[in-house]
Image: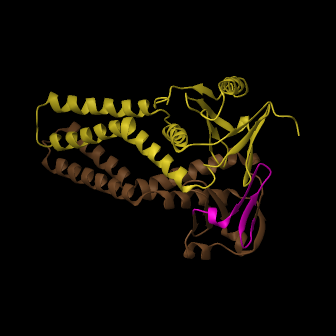
Amino acid sequence: MAKPVLKFKNELSVRDYAEGYRLYDIRRGRCMGREIKASLFFFLAMAMLFMLMQEGFNIPKLPVCSIVLLICIYMCCFFLYIQPNMSKHRGEQIYKSSRLISMEYTFEMHKEYFIMKNEYESLKRYYTELSDCIETDNIFLLIGGTEKKIIVISKRCLEEEKKEELSAFFKKETIRQYRRTRSRRKKK
Amino acid sequence: MNDTEKGILPENIDVSFLPTEEDYVYMNLEKEKYLTPKANKIIFRIIGMAGILSGTAGLVLRNGNIIETICFLLLIAVSLFVISFYDVIRPFLVFKSSSAFFRYNEKDIISKNLSINDKTITVNDELHRISIPKEYIYEVYKSKRTLFIFLDKEEFIYIPLRVLNS
């Protein structure tokens, strides 16, 4: 087997996995991005409010517009605040329910694929299988494949030099999928 | 894993299988059904019912304005969509998307080898190998066509029951 370009060990904390899962979960679906989904409901809510104000409070329109308005406000809050928190909580639950995620894995990064392994599991994934490669201040998140769809690499376990090497490596090898985003949580 | 779930898990087997499109689609349908919280279904039904009731009330109390009538009919249609979301719409979408996903990724779907003995469960394919003690299994769920072995709340190994029955 060819010599890996990069090799390192990684162990995930519950916060790292929850952050990765949150990013993955809010990007699922055809209409990606919670801001887009929330803004659609925001505009619908505005239209309802406009309809309510335009013709005064006529009896048949009032309950209908009010219900639609309330649903739209709820959906805005859902996509902007409730869903990210629910996803984070779900990520924490998944981490706690798994005996494998919290284990230490060895990553071997090759030119066309990477291998992650420990004593119980070994996974080889080609970069072409990835749909997203997201870097935040705390993690690298690799999304894709038919099983084990999310792989999180914590930056906490990596030395400064290794982090930069890995970031440059992903930028080069996953040029179409790579994206850098800001983290929501503060660095400790 | 509790004793009932251990009972579902077959003992001492060694099988190889290549998932077919039908296996993959039914696995996704059954997984969605199992993992969807019941509270979500209830909330959608309540919202749908509220929409239908207010739409009907609006139609009865309307002033005869055509735009209002269209709005109320639209509200009833949307409410019907919401009420049938988890029973009809979502299964249909899952069916279509997993079928399309399978066809698009058909070349990446490879045969798996599964073996279960007294202490461990091993799943092997060209790219992925898992060999874990049975205590590491989070949950086992047997549906109509598929046996799910959950490694955590979301990640799982699936075996079509046709493979075990043959």
Q: Residue at x 54, y 56 (%)?
A: A97
Colour brown, chain: B
How are the residues colored? Answer: by chain
Residue B25: percent from left, percent from top: 61, 56
Above or below, A104 against A156 in this view is: below
Residue A71: percent from left, percent from top: 29, 42
Q: Nearer the viewer, residue A9 or B78?
A: A9
Above or below, A91 against A34 in this view is: below
> Is residue B119 toward the left or the right of residue B76 in the image?
right
Colour yellow, chain: A
> Is residue B24 toward the left or the right of residue A8 in the image?
left
> Is residue B125 toward the left or the right of residue B91 in the image?
right
Above or below, A152 against A184 in this view is: below
Q: Nearer the viewer, residue A129 or A109?
A: A109
Above or below, A188 against B82 in this view is: above
Q: Is residue B124 magenta?
A: yes
* Quarter-of-image position of residue A116: top right
| Magenta span of residues | B115-138
Residue A176: percent from left, percent from top: 66, 26
* Quarter-of-image position of residue A1: top right
Q: Residue at x 11, y 38 (%)?
A: A58
Residue A141: percent from left, percent from top: 60, 36
Number of numbered discs visible in the structure rendering = 0
